[in-house]
Image (cartoon, helix red, strand yellow):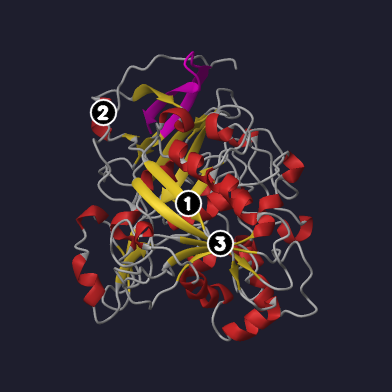
Amino acid sequence: MEGYSYLPADTSLPQDSEVNLTYRDFFYQVDAGSRRCLPGTGESSILVIPVSFIDFAFDEDISSQLETVYQGNNGSYPSVSSFYAESSYGQKQLTFEIAPAFETGLTLDEAFEAAGSKRLSSYLLPLAVNSYEDDLTPFDADGDGYLDGVVLVYSAPDYQSYDYSSFLSLEEQSELWAYTFNLSGQPANIERPSPFTYSWISASFLEKGRGGGLSLDPHTFIHEMGHMFGLDDYYSTDRTDSSSSTPTSERYRAPTGMLDMMDYGLLDHNAFSKWSLGWINPFYVEEDVFSGQSSITVELRDLVNYGEAICIPARGKEYFGNAFGEYILLELYSPSSLNGYDAGRHYQNGYPNGYSMPGVRIYHVDARMWGKGQAFGNAYYAWNPADIAWGHLGVNPLNASYDVAASNTYSESSPENRRYSLLHLLEADGDYTFQNADFEEKGYLFGADNSTLFYPDADHGEFDMENFASFFVNEDGNGRGLFNDGSAFGYALRINGIRSLTEGGHEASITISLS
């Protein structure tokens, strides 16, 4: 590490007192009220219903298993409840009611036939909820007449664990996976709340981590709960869509390198996810903090233990006070706490090992909003989204709404430029492998590893827009990367050192320079 040494901070970065906009604040407006999400803070009670088919009955005590995974003691790995309590720094408390199993009285193919043109899960959801005989109002914390969330855990194996080709179509098989969805069109009912947001998960996901020592595996159940909070998938769903017209170079991209709870279900949530839910409030950089200097040095404690991160908008741009803009985001990863189980461990085939060392993760975030629909001309909006007047959207005759424009799935990004990613983890060695253009030849995704992290040496210690131009869609005339909105970043970063803290976790020294 010649030339690198830990430097004490010479500048304290500002931090707002609160986050002025979260997913919860606007999510119900998206698509004229057809989507909802859990509040990021406070208490929520979720109804979990096992769903059984005649030909795939539960062969063990599913209620006991689900009680353990959702809110019990699962040894070295947290339950869903304890994971979110810790990931939110105590700001979110989840409780789960494991209902008696709903016996469909149907074989799996009979259930698909009964569902007709509906999703199987959407067909079964109201039937399963109606089978719960007790009071449903405890599962409607905000009193809006809709259940805050329902989880259907079905007895049939997921389609990767069982050969259904003899009696199910490919479309039917694709439903036998895990996903979170919204059942719109149900009338609100204050006395007997209706189902709306729900997760659909095969019981076979309980067994995925057995090779890594988990007798009951919560990974997928934690991931799907993230969707209930409004978080997007950070992997590309185009890869498994045989009908997708997405170019090969974009279909197999993995912008966060698989190592994130909302990517391949590993490790803790990243700083963007936590910020967008109101769990953290990053420090931020604006040009005036330099006070005439060409560089400043700051210290950053790790995200998983201390909830710290740094947001750096393009030079000259204002800091919005929320996650829904375009910027560079820094977090210090520590292989401890919620990261500890997956750190350095091989979870299952096709998954990378979790990072086993501390290091800075640098993301390019493009969470700008756009106005969807004819009334807005499908346009990006550059102003602070916290200032949007949300109230009129539900009655807009043109069904217009706001949403986050970019996605890590090419086909789901705004048509203005589908190459824009919501969250792109920059690889410290400067080699952009996450685009995975070689997938069809090599047959595997390129996942993140320790070399992805920024740490203090000549090959992993510095970031600027010239040496990392290939990670950005746009460039200026001098070969420097530009933000998606055309702005020049205007800064360079150097990781001076990372040290262990006596109270646990890690701290990094980072120099930020004008460039």
- Count every numbered label the image shows and give the total: 3
Under circle 2, the secondary element is: helix
Depth order, front residue of 357/492: 357
Give me the C-alpha separation between circle 3 and circle 1: 13 Å
Q: What residue lies at 59% left-to-right and 64% top-to-bottom?
A: 101
Whole-percent x and y of residue 115? 58, 83
Q: Is residue 144 magenta?
A: no
Q: Which residue is mark 3?
A: 100
Chief secondary structure of the magenta span?
strand
Q: What residue lies at 44% left-to-right and 55% top-to-bottom?
A: 46
* Amino acid type indicated by mark 3: Pro
Depth order, front residue of 239/143: 143
Q: Which residue is mark 1?
A: 96
Of badges 3 and 1, nearer the viewer stands: 3
* Placement of the N terminus among the 4 image quadrants: top right
Depth order, front residue of 93/72: 72
* Amino acid type indicated by mark 1: Phe
Span shown in magenta:
492-515
Whole-percent x and y of residue 487? 35, 49
Which labelled disc corresponds to residue 289?
2
